[in-house]
Structure formats: structure tokens, C-alpha cells
Image (cartoon, helix red, strand yellow):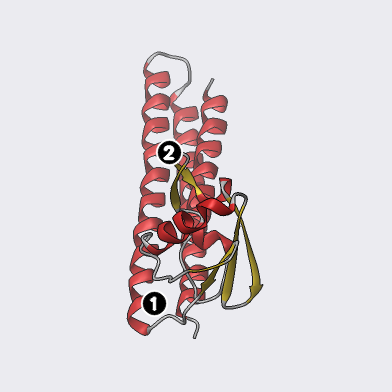
């Protein structure tokens, strides 16, 4: 039972790290990446839909994204959604495609993005620590109920702390790497 809780804790912490990795990809670095538009939601067909369900996004040049809607009639809606997504991007509709030039980041904007990255990383750390807290309580309950011994409890708590430290360190490495990308001129 305790072994199973430890596996579940590891899996939950892995999911938290993966979520942070995905979130970090949505932060602009000054280079074109389709992931920048991952959070864009478009009002189309009487509902709000993710951009990736309505169009194909490609990177023909390092400073340009090209969005090709599956249905040309919603191109202006897609452009409006990109414009209003607070990404600092100004798309232009060119027939059936939308060109999204990626402007170079100012120093001020880079620092804003670093703050956003730090907030995202802290949310990830909190998530990992929450998993640790829940599993620790479960292990202590198991020990009180006699399912595991005191020595086993201390060994599991030590393993749990090592697991937590490893995942937080991983988040810190991801943050450091992404911060370098954002600050790179």
C-alpha cells in the first residue's frame, strides 16, 4: 500500500513537471514557434475553440508564423483572436492565410516574461509540494493504523522528500533554461 502511494506521488509530480514544461513553451522568446499560439482561443461556429482545431500553424522563417485556416471564412476571426490574445503580435490576413510576424522583444518585455516564468515555476513547485503533503499525511495515517511500521514510515518520508527535491530541482532547471532563452538577444 505504501509503495503504491509512492508510485502515485512520483507520477503526480511528473505530471506537474510536464505541465510546467508545456506552459513554458507558450512564453515568447523572440523566435517564431507554433507553441506561442497554443493559448489562443477563437470565436468560430458559435463557440470558442482552440486555434489548433481551426488552423495549421507553420514557421517558414525564424521571425514569422503562418496560420492556414481549414476554413477560409474564419480567417478574420482567427486574426482578431491572435490580436486580442495579449501576446504582442499583429497578424495580417493575406487571402487564405494569416501572417504573424514575431517582433524582437524589448528588454522591458523580456523582463516581464521572466516574471511570468517565475510565477509559472512557483505554481509548479507548489503543486509538487502539495503532492508531498498529501502523501505524507497518507503515510502517517497508515502508520497510525498499523499498516506500516515507524521505521518504514521514516524511510518512506525520506524517499518522499528526495522525490520532491528532485522534481523541484527539475522545475528550477527548466526555469533557468527558459529564462536564458527569453533573455537571449
Please tell me whether mark 1 sits on a helix, a strand or a loop: helix
Q: Is residue 115 something that shows in the picture?
A: yes
* Number of marks in picture: 2
Q: Nearer the viewer, residue 116 or 56?
A: 56
Looking at this view, is 100 or 125 the one in front?
100
Residue 10 place in picture, x, y as percent: 54, 38
Residue at image position (52%, 53%) is 22
Of the 4 image quadrants, the one containing the N terminus is: top right
Mark 1 to mark 2: distance in Å? 33 Å
Within the image, what quadrant is residue 77 found in? bottom left
Pointer 1 residue: 110
Q: Is residue 166 visible?
A: no
* Residue 52 percent across, percent down from the top left: 57, 50
Residue 145 place in picture, x, y as percent: 39, 13
Residue 7 location, quadrant: top right
**Of 55 and 123, which appears nearest the observer?**
55
**Quick one: label 1, few (<14), some, or many (20+) residues within 10 Å?**
many
- 48 vs 145, nearest the viewer: 48
Q: Is residue 119 above or below residue 28?
A: above
For the point 47% across and 69% down, the residue is 91
Q: Is residue 57 left or right of residue 46?
A: right
Per the rendering, the mark at residue 47 is 2
Q: Position of residue 11 (x, y in %)?
A: 56, 37
Looking at marks 1 and 2 on the same chain, the residue that comes earlier in the sequence is marked by 2
Amino acid at each position: 500500500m505504501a509503495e503504491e502511494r509512492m508510485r502515485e506521488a512520483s507520477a503526480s509530480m511528473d505530471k506537474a513537471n510536464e505541465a510546467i514544461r508545456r506552459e513554458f513553451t507558450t512564453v515568447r522568446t523572440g523566435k517564431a514557434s507554433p507553441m506561442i499560439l497554443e493559448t489562443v482561443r477563437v470565436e468560430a461556429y458559435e463557440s470558442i475553440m482552440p486555434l489548433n482545431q481551426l488552423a495549421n500553424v507553420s514557421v517558414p522563417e525564424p521571425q514569422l508564423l503562418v496560420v492556414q485556416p481549414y476554413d477560409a471564412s474564419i480567417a478574420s476571426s482567427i486574426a482578431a483572436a491572435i490580436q486580442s490574445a495579449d501576446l504582442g503580435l499583429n497578424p495580417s490576413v493575406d487571402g487564405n492565410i494569416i501572417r504573424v510576424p514575431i517582433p524582437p522583444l524589448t528588454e522591458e518585455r523580456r523582463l516581464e516574461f521572466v516574471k511570468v516564468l517565475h510565477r509559472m515555476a512557483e505554481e509548479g513547485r507548489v503543486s509538487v509540494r502539495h503532492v508531498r503533503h498529501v502523501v505524507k499525511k497518507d503515510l502517517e495515517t497508515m502508520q497510525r493504523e498499523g499498516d506500516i511500521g515507524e521505521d518504514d514510515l521514516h524511510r518512506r518520508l525520506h524517499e518522499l522528500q528526495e522525490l520532491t527535491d528532485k522534481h523541484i530541482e527539475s522545475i528550477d532547471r527548466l526555469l533557468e533554461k527558459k529564462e536564458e532563452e527569453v533573455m537571449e538577444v
